[in-house]
Image: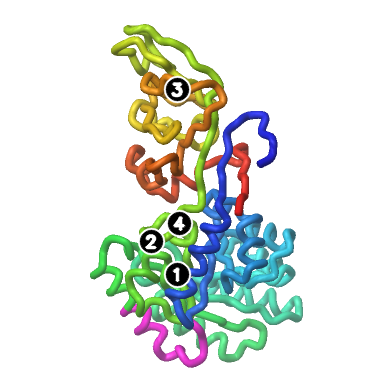
Amino acid sequence: MKDLFRPTWAEIDLNSLAYNLKKLKEILGKSRLMFVVKANAYGHGIEEVSLFAQQNRLCDWLGVSSVEEGLLLRQKGIKLPVLVLGSVYPMKNFQAFAEHNLTPTISSLWGVKELDKTAMSLGKKINCHIKIETGMNRIGVSENAFKSIMSFLETSRNVCVQAAYSHFSSADCDRDYSLMQLNLFKKITAPYEKFIERHMANSAGALNFPRARFDMARCGWAAYGYVKGFKPAMSLKSRIVFIKNVKRGAFISYNKSYKAAKNMRVATIPAGYGDGYIRAFSNRGYVLIDGQKCPIVGNITMDMFMADISGLKKAQVGDEVVLMGKSGKEYIGPDFLASLADTIGYEITTLIMSRVPRIYKM
């Protein structure tokens, strides 16, 4: 582990990541695996985990949200196929797709016509995936628009449709709605299934709906280990940098947000909402020190927060503090932290800022 001037870091367990990706490949069987690495790999570090997956042949595709993410991967030596899952605009961006061998998502007839123009002007054939709307109502073409796109491309020598895909909105919580989406996607794509590949499932879709695996599944949350049966890949850690004795009746942190009900021993920890450890955890969450739960006291500040260590008589400056992860028999996961903030675990991991160094271990 490299020296840290400020002892707060995110620890990424590459062995756990490898376990998760291998397990997903086993579950998918003949279907390929797209490892979704958008949003800095859900906070885990897009460059490092993508290179690791490529070097160890742990996935078949990578999924990103933007051209910028795709270009970054190419600059770092990633050769795997990369699908940009976001909508393309402005249309001149198609040139970057062609120059860097990135695969665009097409979600309109206008988009495919502009892609065709770009490919023709460059004298290149460009592959694409067509996004179909089945109930998410974010981006995607209707059944009629999909037919129009496929009809248009029958005469194009410049654009090749590799696949059609859609996206579950509620595969983790609404079976009936998910089945409706699945059946609609199958209906729309059935006339073309011999000519193009199909993919629809995210992590929850791949695990809960085997029929949705098609030719490929796009997995992120399970790949990072935050689904039952998988191994969490990230821990967020820090160290105690200051300890003070606080008298009964004294206030702690901004806005007098905590009043000591008794004499207390309080640790200061150098992490805060400037790192993505959000203010919503104030006076609600806890950290782990030597396998023990220590409540957060007072408002979390931008760079520091305080925890009650009255029950840890031997705790001292320099002791490790687990903000997310395991210590002894205790575990704090992103979904638990999300429950404190009325959000989802995805937001918790992706919020961990770039100023928090990522340490990769095997």
Question: Which label sits in the foreground, 3 or 1?
Answer: 3
Choose the circle earlier in sequence order: 3 or 2.
2
Residue 321: x and y in percent read 49, 32
Residue corresponding to mark 3 = 306
Residue 232 among those drawn in magenta: no
Label 1 near label 3: C-beta < 8 Å? no
> Would residue 107 be found to the left or right of residue 99 on screen?
left
Choose the circle earlier in sequence order: 3 or 1.
1
Part of the protein shown in magenta: 183-197
> Would residue 114 be found to the left or right of residue 231 on screen?
right
- Using the image, tell me which numbered label, if any, was put on residue 50: none
Residue 13: x and y in percent read 55, 52
Task: Report how far apart the C-alphas of labels 3 and 4 lie in the structure.
Answer: 29 Å
Residue corresponding to mark 1 = 140
Q: Amino acid at mark 1?
A: Gly
Q: Nearer the viewer, residue 103 or 323?
A: 323
Q: Nearer the viewer, residue 85 or 13?
A: 13
Question: Which label sits in the foreground, 3 or 2?
Answer: 2
